[in-house]
Image (tube, rainbow, N blue to C red):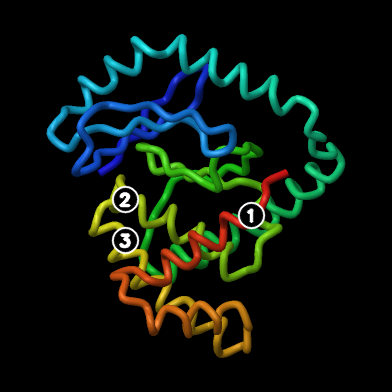
Amino acid sequence: MEKIYSDSQIGDVVFRKRKGSRRISIRVHPVKGVSVTIPYMVPYMAAEAFFRLKRDWVLETMARQKEKYKDVAPADPQEVESLRRQAKKVLPVRLAELAGRYGFTYNRVAIKHNSSNWGSCSAKNNINLNLNIVRLPEVLQDYILLHELCHLRHRNHGREFHRLLEQLLADNIKEYVAEGDALAEEFLSRSSSSKSCNPLGRLMSGALSGYRML
């Protein structure tokens, strides 16, 4: 179970309930952002209060990470703008196609440039998509778009969310396999021998970790 908490300086913070967790813990990642792990029986309100107490520490940690990676070459502005134009042209159209095919309705779609996530879906049914998505193979682009569309029905990453996403991925990948897409064929082949209840989702999520955002 997950909940998104928005902070004016930190951005989106993911509160994630985990069975087996014994205490509330906060993780600050330079790419994945800030997440809070919560024992299953602890209410979100208590976890948010704990986070607010540790907020200064989170900001200090983020500042240290920023200083550590300051020498990493920034993305070329012209390349970013080129990607933004391409993303605005391609992603909203494809999102609408997939939404129409699988019966989803959303409000607005916005193209963002950040290094913390590939996309997000707000409580108002607005979808944000990272311009870096257009640098991915098309079958992985669809994975991200379908992931965000599924959040229109399931706001967390629980069992029902993954069940729905897996169903849509299994149907959608047929289009790519029929066209001879080698990556899609590999995903389908590997998923057929997997014992996971959501093999395509796991395989595609794992594949995304190999791509660096600009």
Instruction: Kindly identify the amino acid type of the residue bearing the numbered disc 1.
Output: Ile
* Label 3 close to label 2 by CB (< 8 Å): yes
Closest to the camera, between mark 2 and mark 1, is 2
Q: Where does the image place residue 206, in percent across and percent down from the top left?
A: 50, 60
Task: Check disc 2 and give the amino acid type.
Answer: His
Cβ atoms under marks 2 and 1 closer than 8 Å: no
**Residue at 63% in and 83% down:** 182
At which x and y percent is residue 85? 76, 49
- SS for callout 3: helix
Q: Which residue is mark 3?
A: 162
How many numbered marks have been drawn onto this rendered protein structure? 3
Of the residues under marks 1 and 3, which one precedes in the sequence?
1
Q: Residues within 10 Å of mark 2 (few under 14, many from 20)?
A: some
* Residue at (46, 80) in percent of width and height: 190
N-terminal of the pair, mark 3 or mark 2, is: 2
Residue 42 in which image quadrant: top left
Q: Which residue is mark 1?
A: 133
Residue highlighted by disc 2: 157
Would residue 83 appear left or right of 194 to someone viewing this image? Answer: right
Q: Is residue 202 left or right of residue 68?
A: left
